[in-house]
Amino acid sequence: MSSATRRFTSTAMGALTLAAALLVICPLLLIFGFLLYQGASAVNVDFFLHLPKPVGEVGGGVANAIVGSLIMIALAVSLGLPVGILGGVYLAESRDRRLPWVLRFVADVMNGIPSIVFGIFAYTVVVIPMRRFSALAGGLALGLIMVPIVLRTTEEMVRLVPNALREAGLGLGLPQWKVSLRIVIPAARAGIITGVMVAVARIAGETAPLLFTALGNRFWQQGLDQPIAALPLQIYSYAIAPYDDWHRQAWAGALVLITLVFLASLAARLATRGRAVAR
Amino acid sequence: MTKRSFLAVMLLVVPLASLPGPADAQLLMNGAGATFPYPIYSKWFEEYIKVDPEVRFNYQSIGSGGGIRQITERTVDFGASDGPMTDEQLKKAPAELFHIPTVLGAVVATYNLPGNPQLSFSGDVLADVFLGRITKWNDARIKALNPSASLPDQPIVVVHRSDGSGTTYIWVDYLCKISPEWEQKVGRGTSVKWPVGLGGKGNEGVAGQVKNAPGSLGYVELAYAITNKLPAAKIRNQAGKFIEPTIESTTAAAAKSMPADFRVSLTDSPGPEAYPVASFTWLLVYKDQPNETKGRSLVKFLWWAIHDGQKHAAALLYAPLPAPVVKDIEAKIKQITFSGKPLLAAQ
Amino acid sequence: MAAESTAGAGTADGLSFPPRAISGRRAALGDRVYTVLVLASVWLVLLLAAGLVAALIWESWEAIRTFGFHFLVTSQWDPVAGEFGALPFIYGTLVSSLLALLIAVPLSLGAAIFLAELAPSWIRPPISFLIEMLAAVPSVVYGLWGIFVLVPWLRDWVQPGLGRTLGFLPLFQGPPYGIGTLAAGMILSIMVVPYITSVSREILLAVPGSQREAALGLGATRWEATRMAVLRYGRSGLIGAILLGLGRALGETMAVTMVIGNRPEIAASLFAPGYTMASVLANEFTEATSDLYVSALVEIGLLLLVVTVVVSGLARLLVWSVGGPARGGRE
């Protein structure tokens, strides 16, 4: 291939990737535009501070749903984060033949299971024995969805940490667990956070698994062992109703949800900012 | 290090969350079930706070089948369903369950044609459209019922529900009564094997599809047709009159004698002004309540719902219960007990 | 004791697991605690997954017993008559997911390459953020956007256009409903893009600069450096990202069921309505009345698991046969 062809290919590929990036943003802008157009009028202070109201009455809000979602995401993260990260490190570092292969396989499969199945599982093991719907069941279902996402992305990120860093740590006399926890994981930090935030974004918007676990609640929380409101549930209830007023609140709720995830993602990135690796 | 502080934050949130929130002193009653009555129930539960500030009713729509299953499992205090429970389902419940009718709803045939003329159908024509026997809008049988409407030479795009639903149950229950072929080939249920057509998810999915695709014909709850400004066809009832689906004609469908357990189908009702595709929606409660305080709150609410609650129905496009049926339901509510003693003192 | 090393666990090439204490008692304790925690996590995941599969098999046993192998090859889905066959759902799931990946993978990888390699550093954070936010949009919102915006566009512009130009292919024949397999594939591709793009971007960013510099130093153009050094180095990670997206596509329920037409029939055309395994589960589970009905639905959930396994396995096989394990990772 002549060098002119090679240079042309390079420029062309550059243009193509730019086009790809733009195309990828297009639906996002369309959807945001749609949500803004439909729901912006319903976003006001009441929306954030008040409980839901029946049709036709003004001043209703999704305050309890916001709090409920935050609570269940916290529960899910307390399961998904440690298990996912530790499991991911294991997959990347282990020399064993079989166990990592099994775990990786299981994680890939779990990633493909529809979220409603996790809801049904949490229903069977938590709701039925407790004889009630609860935030705990909802948190479990969401945590289960989170684990394989965090696990696989952590594995891939940790793999890419250059061996030189590990060797340096070991060479300084650090025990292996310190090398993993204090050197390798922080080095892969940005990527791990991305994986975690993608998982959090996913579970923040999940409706189906919460139908049989958290149930939903029109009122404020009364404990982790009671039904609890959640933004996606409230959005779903409003969206499938026949009333325009509720539709607007559904779109507004979606806007709020996306904004909250955005802020959380920003916060996570800022909190873990530090020396980047080999960029 | 930051992971640790992140975890610390999480660990703080969780115990804070376990603290009871504001206004926690009330009793919380949980119910789940049909999506159709969700708007009216949420209105009722909000209004009822003024009547009895000590109780909060939390209702979530997870579907009629979900409502039946949850009340059977006793994970909720009451269930709700658009279709009556079958004998088999009642047998699986740990104790006797009552069906308490609350309001009525109508399922309408809606369509999308140029100019949206007011159309009239008969049950057998509708059955044949949904069976795939009548495929074009300008079919002779449709023309015969609508001599003055201009019907295009276009295929009918049938739209039905893809998700299991009480609305579907009411619709196919009606078609079963009218068309022996439908009853034999398809039958009745919340989900059936549709011979033709596209499946939309939920009432809003069907309404959305019909609204956007010319030539469609689908079935939705009356409230969705009205709020989406979709036309609703007149359907010929058992008495031979073509009835427009309205609040009044829906209530008229319940003007017949009720069985004691209220598990009755109101489709193809004999009343002269009755709209033929109407139905009750029920709350499912145990005859013998497991908890006295909760049981008392429940029966007081039920009493309120069938009396004062009815005046909110029409504004939200539901049909109120007719007076004779209310009397029958009163008697039923009085039979609800705790440890054998009726909960509702004679009113 | 767990801290004893397994065969071949040396420290010359990085870390071993379980870790071998090399300095002092505190270090040994730390290593042991670490080992216990990690293994506990691993086994927790495996046990939960096993519990899930066991629960699925248990619930679907009645259907497995009644229908046996026929379940996989019959197309009847009749809840009233109690006849259930899963073939149209398997077909619909595979077709819609394949279509979604065909659209999403080139776009996502292209966008990731752009963000990681070619974009000026001030563009990267905002655009990356925007793309990640796509993952937060609830699927019911995707579905409704699909019904109100995507489907009319398909019905009025795209499908008639495709029918006119490529209508000789059976893929693009039939009346333009708007709703159908094509709509589902497109919505799925939008939903899958944020996963593949975000993870791929991180993978590419994590490739050491030395790789890139080495290629450039040898006279490669920017694209060649990207292709030979970066993409190859991060290949296993990129495959992982694509599999993540695939998993999302296979398991997505709400958005798909709102735009796919929900017709349990196998059709060659992308314009025709279809039905996926996840959709039928979401649609009918809450209302399923008889025990056999519930059992058949749970068996579909189990089948979806099997399909995920098979497709993931095939994908890995394909990649491995093309190029062998990637450098920099440990296969």
Image: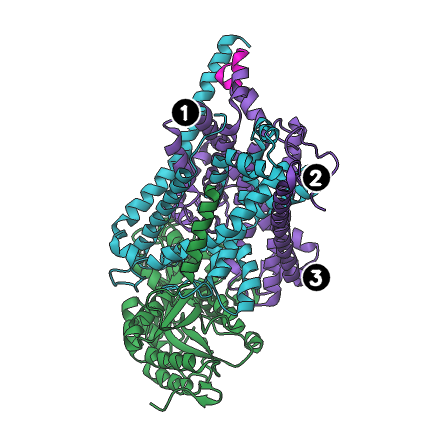
Chain colours: A cyan, B green, C purple
In this view, the mark in front (1 or 3): 1
Out of B268 and C237, give the one closest to the viewer: C237
The first of marks 1 and 3 along the sequence is: 3
State if disc 3 and disc 1 touch (CB < 8 Å): no
* Residue type for callout 3: Arg
The residue at which mark 3 appears reads as C65
x%, y% of residue A169?
58, 31
Element type where label 3 sits in the image: helix
Quarter of the image where one finds residue B312: bottom left
Do marks 1 and 3 share a chain? yes
Q: What amino acid is found at the position of numbered circle 1 in the picture?
A: Ala
Q: Is circle 2 on the same chain as circle 1?
A: no
In the rendered structure, the answer to whether residue A251 lies left or right of residue C298 reads left
What residue is pinned by disc 1? C119
Q: Is residue C107 magenta?
A: no
**Disc 3: CA contacts within 10 A as few (<14), some (14-19) or many (>=20):** few
> From what the image shows, is residue B81 above or below residue B325?
above
> Which residue appears at 64% of the width and 50% of the height?
C43
Q: Which residue is mark 2?
A: A96
- In what element is the residue under mark 1? loop
Residue C253 picture location, percent across and down: 50, 51
Name the chain letter of the residue that bears numbered label 3: C
**Magenta part of the protein: which range?**
C215-225
Three-letter residue code for mark 2: Asp
The dominant secondary structure in magenta is helix
Can the viewer see residue A12 in this picture?
yes
Frontmost residue, B250 versus A23: A23
Query: Which one is nearer the viewer's eye here, C256 or B179?
Result: C256
Element type at mark 2: loop
